Image: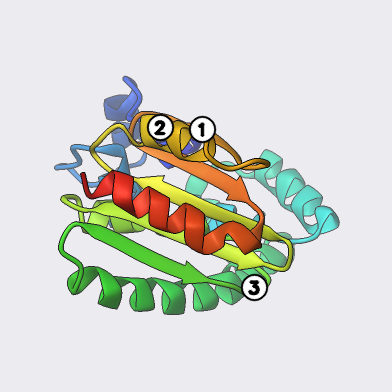
Amino acid sequence: MAGSIADNYMPEFKDEFSKLYPELWKKEINSAFQALYETDFGKIIQMLAFALKDRTSSVVNMTNFLISVNSPSDVFIENEKNSKILKRYSQVYKIYSKLLENAKNIARSSRKVIFFHYGGDLSMSADLANELSYRFPGKIILVAYIKGTYANVSIRGRIDVRKITLEAISNFEGATGGGHKNAGSINFVPNKKEEILNLLKSYLKK
């Protein structure tokens, strides 16, 4: 269930899940991203996703903890087994919430295309792009993460962003990317940042 919701897919067994865990769900949930951003179950998904942004040993400990739980709600109960999960989530969420607020400020003043870029130690472009696409459904989202020799841009929108992604990378040697109809990403070298972002924005404004 968690994997489906995180991938913006509402599984057929959602009603069965909501009956089993009504405290984590809401009656009027019409989309996967609504569940992700408006329910306690969505918060659990985000907690685990952010806790994954850690060293391998911590991820292994988290996996062992999840195997032992009896209910999804056990994730909220702080104890010796999950204290590191909650601590890491808190650390990452603090960074994420600041970035999201900055991106929202840009989004509110953007007419069609929202472009937000940032750096740092954590790559969260997909997380940010997903939430921005939910908060601003009528707009096209570009979130670029740039660090050293690595650069990535996550794209979201109701248009065929995969087609645009493939057209854009065909113009740049070394650029790779792909995705789904409404969600895509591109990896490229930072010295091509301005060129590739300008090309993307020109495609998206057509």
Q: Where is residue 205? Give x, y as percent.
A: 23, 50
Which residue is at 39% across, 71% downward? Answer: 100
Quadrant containing the C terminus in the rendered view: top left
Local secondary structure at mark 2:
helix
Q: Which numbered disc covers residue 87? A: 3
Q: State whether residue 84 is above or below residue 21.
A: below
Point out the tag, 3 or 2, that comes first from the N-terminus: 3
Please say if the residues under marks 1 and 2 sit with CB atoms less than 8 Å apart. Answer: yes
Q: Which numbered disc covers residue 162? A: 2
Image check: 106 left or right of 59?
left
Q: Where is residue 50? Give x, y as percent.
A: 58, 59
* Amino acid tagged 2: Arg
Q: Looking at the picture, tell me which residue is in the foreground, 40 or 93.
A: 93
* Amino acid tagged 1: Gly
Near mark 2 (Cα within 10 A), the count class, few <14, some 14-19 or many ≥20, is many
Which residue is the site of mark 1?
178
Local secondary structure at mark 1:
strand
